[in-house]
Image (tube, rainbow, N blue to C red):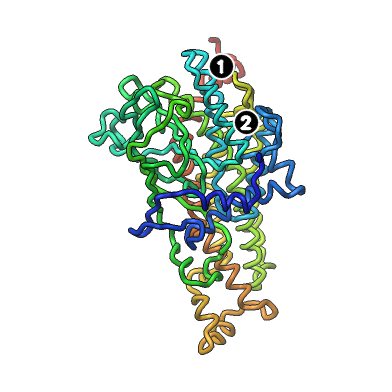
Amino acid sequence: MSLKTKEEYIESLRKMNFKLYMFGEKVENIVDNPIVRPSMNAVAMTYELAQDPQYEDLMTAVSSLTGKKINRFCHLHQNNEDLIKKVKMQRLLGQKTAACFQRCVGMDAVNALDSTTFEMDQKYQSGYHKRFRSWLKEMQENDWTVDGAMTDPKGDRSLLPSQQKDPDMFVHIVSENKDGIIVKGAKVHQTGALNSHQILVMPTIAMGPADKDYAVCFAVPADSEGIIYIYGRQSCDTRKLEGGEMDLGNSQFGGHESLVVFDNIFVPWERVFMCREYDFSGVLIERFAGYHRQSYGGCKVGVGDVLIGAAALAADYNGANKASHIKDKLIEMTHLNETLYACGIACSSQGSRTASGTYLIDLMLANVCKQNVTRFPYEIARLAEDIAGGLMVTMPSEKDFKSPEIGHYVEKYLRGVADIPTEHRLRILRLIENITLGTAAVGYRTESMHGAGSPQAQRIVISRQANFEAKKKLAKAIARIPE
């Protein structure tokens, strides 16, 4: 198969048996659930665009393993051009969905794991790399969406995994036999998990000898026996149950997160890619985090493009588009957005080849990219809200607008520029609300802060990569201070 169509992707999820709970009740049909469906539509766009000749160069690649054309989300980066195309692809999808399209975590996980398993085999002759690439070929052939699962609940942050009162605060190996391992624990904030075919589990922190049972990496079908999903609430999520679409702002697309519980699940050895090799947990985490921090220089920029366009339209509809301060705010939003993109392109262009042949981004620049992402989208959102005006959060509902009794009042008094329909003004304000405050804020504003690691995580890597001693030598040389 290699390349699924949008329709084939959706039908493939119908065949899966997820155990999902939402609002305290079990959900039997996730594909047609009105709260889940917009996030599924966003993932489906990654399949739809891959079938479009206009976007073939960005959305597809030739597999380094099989020589077949595959979706770029299943690809191992083979050069700097691949890394750059990844960021451009993510910007395109952000522009098309104005939401999180959810496949980035799996793509970043497989690229990090490829080089890490290769180096593990060099040290331990473990056979993990061969196992991993065998599974990866299946991922490419079936065009799987993979949920990269890294973040554990962590419990008491002052304690190591092995020191926790409850050992299940980190995913860990419970037992093993000749057929495989039994694991228990949970992963939190799992973006797009319910829209995935497979879950690729990784450790969440660097481990020491005492925590070796927590140094585990494996892949399992997303509907495996013993996996339980508990849906994460989002702001304004129940608007999707009201029957309308204007109040949603973005009625087509969205993202989702879940708490994913692993209740003593079995993993066969052929799907185990790390088993107590604690000394490589930090390597895997750093590389995955670097790739994912690079990703934010694409996806957040694409959503930012939509938000800037929405703010510009709001100014048009309000009759404020000629005001100099409005023009300046739109310029500032653009400057900040393009700075994020520049960082994503920069860390890609400076990437280098790992021992396995897969290319790794420049870790310093990737972390600088994500550090900027923890700040700039907040300012872009603030300026969009400033331009939109207070009506964005006080306007009546779609049902009021369409009411035979009072709709004409809404139509009359909420009009801006006379020749712009009131409905158009309300729709664009709802879109701004959705991206800055509503369900899409999960994939733009708040995720910009905590996705791919909270701000301090990037600062730690930046500190390690900074090489202050080398910089001191540069200063001494210029100041003519002897060593």
Extreme residue in the left direction: 165
Image location (x, y in percent) of residue 307: 60, 58
Residue 473's tag is 1
Say which quadrant the N terminus sits in: top right
**Mark 2, secondary structure of its residue:** loop
Disc 2 marks a residue whose amino acid type is Leu
Q: Position of residue 419 (x, y in %)?
A: 70, 79
157 left or right of 426?
Answer: left
Residue in the foreground of this view, choosing between 171 and 283:
171
Left or right, 38 with respect to 229, comes to: right
| Disc 1 from disc 2: Cα separation | 38 Å
Observer-nearest of 293 and 194: 194
Q: Choose top left, top right, bottom left or bottom right for residue 386.
A: bottom right
Q: Position of residue 467 (x, y in %)?
A: 52, 22
**Which label belongs to residue 76?**
2
Marks 1 and 2, the one that precedes in the sequence: 2
Does 21 sit left or right of 398 as displayed?
A: left
**255 on left or right of 312:** left
Q: Residue furthest top?
A: 483
Q: Secondary structure at mark 1?
A: helix
> Could you tell me if residue 325 is visible in this image?
no
Q: Residue at x 38, y 33 (%)?
A: 266
Q: How many marks?
A: 2
Amino acid type of the residue tagged 1 in the rendering: Lys
In the displayed structure, would residue 247 be above or below residue 410? above
Q: Nearer the viewer, mark 1 or mark 2?
A: 2
Image-quadrant location for residue 296:
top right
Q: Mark 1: few, some, or many residues within 10 Å (few <14, many ≥20)?
A: some
Residue at point 64%, 28% (across, down): 351
